Image: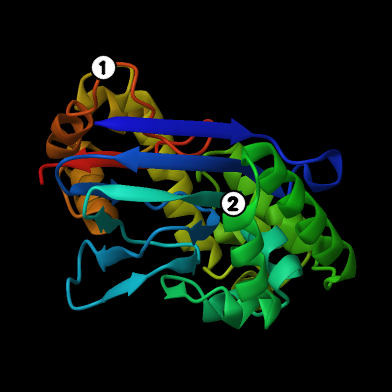
Amino acid sequence: MSYELVRRAPCRALRGAVLGYQGFRVVSAAPRRRLELPNGCVDLVFLFDGPIRLTDALDPTRAASMPCLATGPRTTAAVGEHPGRVHGVQVTLTPLAAHTIFDVPMHEVANSWVDPGELLGAGARGLAERLAGSADWGARFRLLDQVLSARLRAGPRGSADVLWAWRRIQATAGRVTVAELAAATGQSRRHLERGFGEQVGLPPKSVAMVARLQSALRLSETGLPLSQVAAMAGYHDHAHFTRCFRTLVGLAPSRFRAARALTRPGEPIDRIDHHITSALLPG
């Protein structure tokens, strides 16, 4: 198997909105399957040589095969698979930046995969063709800087209270209640939840569940006993941690650890800095 992975931060105008670009090319003799975890982010993926298939890890009836796609923020894991060759570029955004850049209510794309044309309009096809035809990764990333910067400048400004509350959830790794967020912003709980639906796509409680999961995943990577991971991440006990993990990931924490161990030494697997995003699955 051979793979090429190139990562780059966006231009200064997009910092804090776009979390990064990733160019990739994988050639394998066998099909590849990856478990993609809820991570609180939005991805925009342009593929150059064929589609990938995505299946909800907890509901296999929800599946799609797409050559280009945008994924909204999720509360369940998904399985991505390709026949052995995949080549493309991925953009990872915060959900609030996606709301501005796409100019759509984020609840319309949460827990789903959509064609980029539904979000970027008629220019999406042309952008995909220009990315595929670019001379190298640097040219592709510069093109994305140009297109996304223009859309970020022109898009709607969201509520500062929702932005603050979303950042607070990330900073506390999900260990803050909706009531506390509402009190701190001076909004009613219902008003704050409506704002999250519009700008984030998920209610604050779900955003906190995903943030806590990511905290637990980072702790798990250190090799700590899972009971200790559960306590440090703020779960009531090991059983509570296991139930929540299964609800979001579709596997028990111990089985997920085993899946992570399938990664070759030195092979990059996670798509976002400071996040645990993926695990390889047996073909």
In this picture, residue 102 sits left or right of residue 84? right
Name the residue: 19% across, 25% down.
Answer: 261
Q: Which numbered disc covers residue 223? A: 1
**Amino acid type at image mark 2:** Val
Above or below residue 180? Residue 117 is below
Q: Nearer the viewer, mark 1 or mark 2?
A: 2
Q: Which x, y percent locates residue 216?
A: 36, 34
Pointer 2 local density, CA inside 10 Å: few below 14, some 14–19, many at least 20? many
Name the residue: 14% across, 31% down.
Answer: 258
Name the residue: 10% across, 46% down.
Answer: 283
**Amino acid type at image mark 1:** Gly
Q: Is residue 162 visible?
A: yes
Q: Is residue 180 visible?
A: no
Q: Which x, y percent locates residue 239?
A: 16, 43
- Image quadrant of residue 8? top right
Pointer 1 local density, CA inside 10 Å: few below 14, some 14–19, many at least 20? few
Q: Which x, y percent locates residue 246?
A: 20, 52
- Image quadrant of residue 20? top right
